Image (cartoon, helix red, strand yellow):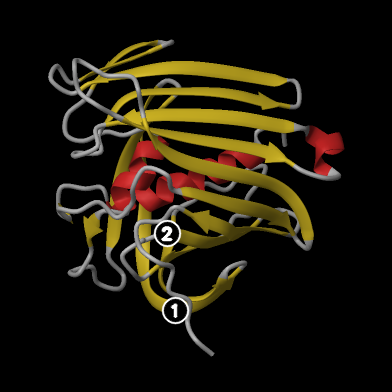
């Protein structure tokens, strides 16, 4: 259970990046801007379990003379769960404001007694990723999971068909990993900020100590110019987990909840 919450957050962030493939095209104008801040609450059944806050800001740092956007995500347990298995994780990604490819990524994870940190540099000219555990060659577009999340929001999905399966690639800890996701169509879904018209996805998850053999993870993303994930749900061995959007500010476009 010590990696429980960060694993779920990682799946949700990474799932958003499933559009980041060669068969799709990035829109010209970014769907977000510096100053955006979004907050999610993670619930175990009816209990509040954790909170994650993601911010985007202009970075004073430059990479090979190029400007960058800084994405910062912080995740922590709340309430009773602080006493059961305290989690306090922080992630940083510095990305090119035009291509949205990552320059640099770092993470610090504190989950009960477990500790992990990493610093990752992406050299897209030499196709080399340098991390604490060594160097890793790559081809094509490879992201960290935060940059993947923001790149995904800028993909033209007009040609996406129900049942289509996509695959993403992202670097984490000791290598480049893949995750597949299926597009399931459109639904109206309620979150902490109202009811929204959404695109529904289901990524593949691996059964184990957390997930059931037949567990399904579902993710709903606003079907508008913001493309914000507003809800995720998955059944686990005992009960279920739900991630819910509870706050959004500094958005490039107004949120568009369905009017009742």
Which circle, 2 or 1, is nearer the viewer?
2
Quickly name the residue at label 1.
Answer: 187
Q: Residue at x 42, y 59 (%)?
A: 228
Residue 259 lies, with reference to residue 114, above or below; the image says below
Residue 70 in the figure: left or right of residue 154: right
Disc 2, SS:
loop
Neighbours of disc 2 within 10 Å: few (<14), some (14-19), many (20+): many
Q: Which image quarter: residue 226?
A: bottom left
34 or 92: nearer the viewer: 34
Residue 11 in the figure: left or right of residue 226: right
Residue 116 lies, with reference to residue 132, above or below; the image says below
**Residue 214 appears in the figure:** no
Q: Which mark is residue 228?
A: 2
**Dot placed on the residue nearer the N-terminal end, 2 or 1:** 1
Residue 142 lies, with reference to residue 11, above or below; the image says above
- The span from disc 2 to disc 1 (Cα, nearest Å) is 14 Å
Q: Residue at x 43, y 74 (%)?
A: 256
Image coordinates of residue 65 in percent, x first then y, are 19, 17
Image coordinates of residue 178 in percent, x first then y, are 35, 40
Image coordinates of residue 215 in percent, x first then y, are 58, 59
Q: Residue at x 58, y 57 (%)?
A: 247
Image coordinates of residue 255 in percent, x first then y, are 44, 68
Q: Quadrant of the N terminus?
A: top right
């Amino acid at each position: 259970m010590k990696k429980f919450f960060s694993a779920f957050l990682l799946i949700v962030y990474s799932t958003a990046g499933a559009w980041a493939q060669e068969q799709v095209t990035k829109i010209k104008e970014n769907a977000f801007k510096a100053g955006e801040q979004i907050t999610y609450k993670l619930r175990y059944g009816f209990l509040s379990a954790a909170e994650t806050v993601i911010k985007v800001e202009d970075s004073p740092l430059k990479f090979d003379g190029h400007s960058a956007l800084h994405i910062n995500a912080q995740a922590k347990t709340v309430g009773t769960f602080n006493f059961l298995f305290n989690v306090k994780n922080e992630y940083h990604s510095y990305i090119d404001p035009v291509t949205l490819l990552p320059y640099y990524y770092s993470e610090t994870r504190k989950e009960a007694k477990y500790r992990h940190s990493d610093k990752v540099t992406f050299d897209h000219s030499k196709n080399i990723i340098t991390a604490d555990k060594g160097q890793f060659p790559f081809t094509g577009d490879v992201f960290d999971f935060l940059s993947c999340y923001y790149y995904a929001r800028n993909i033209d999905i007009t040609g996406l068909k129900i049942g289509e399966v996509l695959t993403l690639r992202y670097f984490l800890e000791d290598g480049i990993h893949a995750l597949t996701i299926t597009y399931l169509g459109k639904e109206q879904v309620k979150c902490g900020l109202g009811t929204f018209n959404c695109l529904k996805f289901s990524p593949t998850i691996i059964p184990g100590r957390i997930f059931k053999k037949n567990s399904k993870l579902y993710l709903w993303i606003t079907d508008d110019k913001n493309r914000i994930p507003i809800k995720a749900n998955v059944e686990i061995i005992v009960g279920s987990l739900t991630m819910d959007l509870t706050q959004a500010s500094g958005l490039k476009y107004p949120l568009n909840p369905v009017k009742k």
